[in-house]
């Protein structure tokens, strides 16, 4: 059974929602997420382990998508034993997202 790419599904759904509001907002959102994932790729160990520590999920890290921006989203990821960064979920910071994180863990 193949692994579900929840991060891409989350990104697509949120971008579609932004696009219904305005094309410009959709583009700004996609750019903000691209900046956050680019930062994660360059600095994977610098992400916050706060939720992983709190929920007892070893290795779970997150990065806020452009802090202080109009997009209050968190990008969750883990660093696999091979050193590969695996993006897990993209969630709105004010949503009840714990279940999304736990269901996407390997």
Image: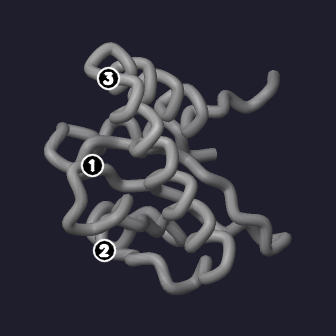
Q: Nearer the viewer, residue 87 or 80?
A: 87
Q: Measured from the top left, where is residue 66 in percent x and y?
A: 35, 64
The residues tagged by marks 2 and 3 sit, at their Cα atoms, a distance apart of: 33 Å
Is the residue marked by circle 2 packed among few (<14), some (14-19), or many (20+) residues within 10 Å? few
Q: Which of 13 and 55 is in front in this view?
A: 13
Q: Which mark is residue 50?
A: 2
Q: Eyeballing the image, is 22 above or below 56?
A: above
Whether the residues at callouts 2 and 3 have beta carbons within 8 Å, the answer is no
* Mark 1 lies on residue: 71
Q: Where does the image place residue 68, in percent across and percent down from the top left?
A: 20, 66
Q: Residue at x 18, y 38 (%)?
A: 95
Q: What is the residue that sits farthest to the front in this orientation?
A: 24
Left or right: where 82 falls relative to 18: right
Q: What element carries label 3?
A: loop
Q: Position of residue 63 (x, y in %)?
A: 41, 67
Q: Which of marks 2 and 1 is nearer the N terminus?
A: 2
Mark nearer the N terminus (2 vs 3): 3
Alpha-carbon distance for marks 1 and 3? 14 Å
How far apart are the alpha carbons under marks 2 and 1? Answer: 20 Å
Quadrant of res 38:
bottom right
Question: Which numbered dot is residue 30?
Answer: none
Q: Which residue shows up at 46% across the image and 37% down it? A: 27
Tell me: residue 73, above or below residue 38.
above
The residue located at (31%, 74%) in the rendering is: 50
Nearer the camera: disc 2 or disc 1: 1
User: Which class describes the residues within 10 Å of circle 3: few (<14), some (14-19), or many (20+)?
Assistant: few
The N terminus - image quarter: top right
């Amino acid at each position: 059974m193949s692994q579900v790419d929840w991060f891409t599904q989350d990104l697509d759904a949120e971008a579609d929602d932004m696009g219904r509001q305005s094309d410009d907002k959709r583009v700004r959102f996609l750019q903000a997420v691209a900046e956050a994932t680019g930062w994660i790729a360059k600095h994977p160990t610098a992400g916050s382990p706060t939720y992983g520590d709190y929920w007892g999920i070893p290795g779970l890290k997150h990065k806020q998508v452009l802090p202080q921006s109009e997009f209050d989203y968190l990008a969750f990821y883990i660093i696999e034993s091979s050193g590969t960064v695996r993006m897990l979920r993209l969630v709105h910071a004010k949503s009840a997202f714990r279940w999304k994180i736990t269901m996407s863990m390997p």
